[in-house]
Image (cartoon, grey):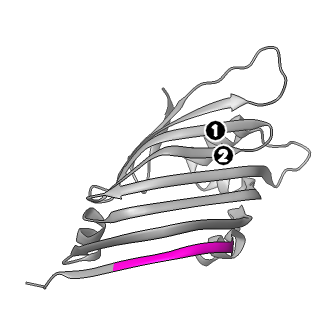
Amino acid sequence: RSPNVGFRTAFRLQDVDMGKVSRLFGDKEIFAGELDGFLDIGGVGRSWHDIMAALNGRIDAGMAGGRINSQFAGYVDMIADFLPALGDDPKRPRGTDVSCFVSRLAIKNGTATTDALMLDTGRAAVRGAGTVDLGREVIDILLKTNSTEGRLVTVSVPLHVQGPLLKPTVAPD
Protein backbone atom coordinates (compact mmCIF):
# COMPACT_ATOMS: atom_id res chain seq x y z
CA ARG A 1 0.00 0.00 0.00
CA SER A 2 1.34 3.41 -0.99
CA PRO A 3 2.05 5.99 1.69
CA ASN A 4 0.17 9.28 1.76
CA VAL A 5 1.75 12.08 -0.22
CA GLY A 6 0.87 15.70 0.26
CA PHE A 7 1.50 19.09 -1.22
CA ARG A 8 0.73 22.72 -0.48
CA THR A 9 1.33 25.65 -2.78
CA ALA A 10 0.48 29.32 -2.83
CA PHE A 11 1.32 31.79 -5.56
CA ARG A 12 0.07 34.89 -7.33
CA LEU A 13 -0.77 34.89 -11.03
CA GLN A 14 0.02 38.09 -12.90
CA ASP A 15 -0.49 38.78 -16.60
CA VAL A 16 -0.72 35.07 -17.50
CA ASP A 17 -1.22 34.83 -21.27
CA MET A 18 -4.28 32.58 -21.50
CA GLY A 19 -3.80 32.16 -25.25
CA LYS A 20 -0.46 30.44 -24.61
CA VAL A 21 -1.91 28.41 -21.72
CA SER A 22 -4.87 27.19 -23.80
CA ARG A 23 -2.51 26.14 -26.62
CA LEU A 24 -0.59 23.97 -24.14
CA PHE A 25 -3.71 21.81 -23.81
CA GLY A 26 -4.51 21.57 -27.51
CA ASP A 27 -3.90 23.01 -30.92
CA LYS A 28 -6.53 25.78 -30.61
CA GLU A 29 -6.38 29.05 -28.73
CA ILE A 30 -9.55 28.76 -26.68
CA PHE A 31 -9.15 31.89 -24.59
CA ALA A 32 -7.11 35.03 -25.13
CA GLY A 33 -6.33 37.65 -22.51
CA GLU A 34 -4.16 38.19 -19.45
CA LEU A 35 -5.29 36.47 -16.25
CA ASP A 36 -4.45 37.68 -12.75
CA GLY A 37 -5.19 35.79 -9.58
CA PHE A 38 -4.15 33.98 -6.45
CA LEU A 39 -3.95 30.26 -5.76
CA ASP A 40 -3.49 28.67 -2.32
CA ILE A 41 -4.25 24.93 -2.31
CA GLY A 42 -3.10 21.74 -0.67
CA GLY A 43 -4.10 18.15 -0.16
CA VAL A 44 -2.97 14.72 1.04
CA GLY A 45 -3.64 11.27 -0.39
CA ARG A 46 -2.27 8.06 -1.90
CA SER A 47 -2.94 9.14 -5.51
CA TRP A 48 -3.68 12.33 -7.46
CA HIS A 49 -7.37 11.42 -7.31
CA ASP A 50 -7.20 11.06 -3.52
CA ILE A 51 -5.33 14.36 -3.22
CA MET A 52 -7.96 16.16 -5.33
CA ALA A 53 -10.74 14.54 -3.27
CA ALA A 54 -9.15 15.97 -0.11
CA LEU A 55 -8.07 19.33 -1.57
CA ASN A 56 -8.47 22.49 0.52
CA GLY A 57 -7.75 26.14 -0.22
CA ARG A 58 -8.89 28.86 -2.58
CA ILE A 59 -8.47 30.08 -6.14
CA ASP A 60 -9.27 33.66 -7.14
CA ALA A 61 -8.91 34.77 -10.76
CA GLY A 62 -9.82 37.71 -12.91
CA MET A 63 -9.27 39.06 -16.39
CA ALA A 64 -9.98 42.54 -17.80
CA GLY A 65 -10.39 42.15 -21.55
CA GLY A 66 -9.91 39.05 -23.64
CA ARG A 67 -11.63 36.76 -26.08
CA ILE A 68 -13.36 33.35 -26.26
CA ASN A 69 -12.65 31.60 -29.56
CA SER A 70 -15.82 30.47 -31.40
CA GLN A 71 -13.90 27.55 -32.94
CA PHE A 72 -13.80 26.03 -29.45
CA ALA A 73 -17.59 25.85 -29.54
CA GLY A 74 -17.38 22.94 -31.98
CA TYR A 75 -15.45 20.89 -29.43
CA VAL A 76 -17.60 21.39 -26.35
CA ASP A 77 -21.38 21.28 -26.62
CA MET A 78 -21.70 23.37 -23.47
CA ILE A 79 -19.87 26.31 -25.07
CA ALA A 80 -21.69 25.82 -28.38
CA ASP A 81 -25.03 26.27 -26.60
CA PHE A 82 -23.72 29.05 -24.41
CA LEU A 83 -21.91 31.41 -26.84
CA PRO A 84 -25.05 32.77 -28.51
CA ALA A 85 -26.26 33.91 -25.08
CA LEU A 86 -22.99 35.78 -24.65
CA GLY A 87 -23.61 37.78 -27.78
CA ASP A 88 -21.20 36.28 -30.32
CA ASP A 89 -20.50 39.17 -32.68
CA PRO A 90 -21.58 38.21 -36.24
CA LYS A 91 -19.18 40.82 -37.67
CA ARG A 92 -16.28 39.05 -35.93
CA PRO A 93 -16.82 35.33 -36.61
CA ARG A 94 -13.75 34.25 -34.69
CA GLY A 95 -15.15 34.70 -31.20
CA THR A 96 -16.67 36.72 -28.44
CA ASP A 97 -14.91 39.64 -26.76
CA VAL A 98 -14.74 39.48 -22.98
CA SER A 99 -14.66 42.76 -21.11
CA CYS A 100 -14.37 41.17 -17.65
CA PHE A 101 -14.08 37.74 -16.04
CA VAL A 102 -14.00 37.04 -12.28
CA SER A 103 -13.99 33.74 -10.42
CA ARG A 104 -13.60 32.90 -6.74
CA LEU A 105 -13.47 29.27 -5.60
CA ALA A 106 -13.38 28.13 -1.97
CA ILE A 107 -12.21 24.50 -1.80
CA LYS A 108 -12.97 22.31 1.20
CA ASN A 109 -12.48 18.53 1.37
CA GLY A 110 -12.32 18.27 -2.42
CA THR A 111 -15.39 20.37 -3.19
CA ALA A 112 -14.88 23.72 -4.88
CA THR A 113 -17.74 26.15 -4.26
CA THR A 114 -18.31 29.43 -6.05
CA ASP A 115 -20.82 32.18 -5.59
CA ALA A 116 -18.61 34.66 -7.45
CA LEU A 117 -18.41 33.58 -11.07
CA MET A 118 -18.96 36.38 -13.57
CA LEU A 119 -18.30 36.92 -17.27
CA ASP A 120 -19.20 40.16 -19.07
CA THR A 121 -18.94 40.55 -22.83
CA GLY A 122 -20.27 44.08 -23.01
CA ARG A 123 -23.33 42.66 -24.76
CA ALA A 124 -24.30 40.11 -22.10
CA ALA A 125 -23.41 39.27 -18.52
CA VAL A 126 -23.24 35.76 -17.08
CA ARG A 127 -23.25 35.06 -13.36
CA GLY A 128 -22.79 31.63 -11.89
CA ALA A 129 -22.83 29.76 -8.60
CA GLY A 130 -22.41 26.13 -7.66
CA THR A 131 -19.95 23.36 -6.90
CA VAL A 132 -17.34 21.13 -8.46
CA ASP A 133 -16.77 17.88 -6.56
CA LEU A 134 -13.18 16.92 -7.40
CA GLY A 135 -13.39 13.52 -5.71
CA ARG A 136 -16.52 12.41 -7.59
CA GLU A 137 -15.45 14.48 -10.65
CA VAL A 138 -18.85 16.12 -11.10
CA ILE A 139 -20.00 19.69 -11.64
CA ASP A 140 -23.23 21.41 -10.59
CA ILE A 141 -23.30 25.10 -11.54
CA LEU A 142 -26.21 27.39 -12.38
CA LEU A 143 -25.48 30.15 -14.92
CA LYS A 144 -27.77 33.15 -15.31
CA THR A 145 -27.45 35.30 -18.41
CA ASN A 146 -28.65 38.86 -18.87
CA SER A 147 -28.45 41.06 -21.92
CA THR A 148 -26.61 44.31 -21.23
CA GLU A 149 -27.75 45.88 -24.48
CA GLY A 150 -30.69 48.28 -24.39
CA ARG A 151 -33.47 46.09 -25.77
CA LEU A 152 -37.16 46.38 -24.97
CA VAL A 153 -37.61 42.61 -24.65
CA THR A 154 -34.91 40.26 -23.42
CA VAL A 155 -35.23 36.51 -22.89
CA SER A 156 -32.91 35.23 -20.20
CA VAL A 157 -32.95 31.50 -19.46
CA PRO A 158 -30.77 30.18 -16.64
CA LEU A 159 -28.54 27.29 -17.70
CA HIS A 160 -27.75 24.35 -15.42
CA VAL A 161 -24.34 22.78 -16.03
CA GLN A 162 -24.17 19.41 -14.31
CA GLY A 163 -22.77 15.91 -14.51
CA PRO A 164 -19.33 14.40 -15.11
CA LEU A 165 -16.50 16.94 -15.46
CA LEU A 166 -15.39 15.42 -18.76
CA LYS A 167 -18.87 15.50 -20.31
CA PRO A 168 -21.29 17.76 -18.46
CA THR A 169 -24.78 18.47 -19.71
CA VAL A 170 -26.21 21.93 -20.17
CA ALA A 171 -29.95 22.41 -19.93
CA PRO A 172 -32.33 25.27 -19.24
CA ASP A 173 -33.14 25.46 -15.53
Report the magenta stretch's main SS: strand
Q: Give whichever of 28, 141 is nearer the camera.
A: 141
Marks 1/2: CA–CA distance? 5 Å
Q: Give whichever of 93, 51 is nearer the camera.
A: 51
In the displayed image of the protein, which residue is found farthest to the top? 152
State whether residue 33 is above or below residue 9. above
Q: Are discs 1 and 2 less than 8 Å apart at CB?
A: yes
Residue 10: horizontal and vertical position, in percent?
45, 76
Q: Residues within 10 Å of mark 2 (few under 14, many from 20)?
A: many
Residue 126 visible to the viewer: yes
State whether residue 95 is above or below residue 52. above
Q: Is residue 89 magenta?
A: no
In the displayed image of the protein, which residue is found farthest to the right? 91
Residue 114: horizontal and vertical position, in percent?
45, 47
Give the number of the disc on residue 119: 2
Disc 1 on helix, strand or loop? strand
State whether residue 75 is above or below residue 129. below
Mark 1, residue position? 126
Residue 25 visible to the viewer: no
Residue in the image at 7% along x and 84% along y? 1
Residue in the image at 61% along x and 78% along y? 24
The disc labelled 2 sits on which kind of residue? Leu
The disc labelled 1 sits on which kind of residue? Val
**Magenta stretch?**
8-16
Residue 16: horizontal and vertical position, in percent?
67, 73
Instruction: Say left or right for 147 vs 74.
Output: right
Residue in the image at 41% along x and 78% along y? 9
Q: Is residue 14 magenta?
A: yes
Residue 86 placement: quadrant: top right
Residue in the image at 75% along x and 51% along y? 98
Instruction: Say left or right for 96 vs 26.
Output: right
Of the numbered discs 1 and 2, the one sitting upstream in the chain is 2
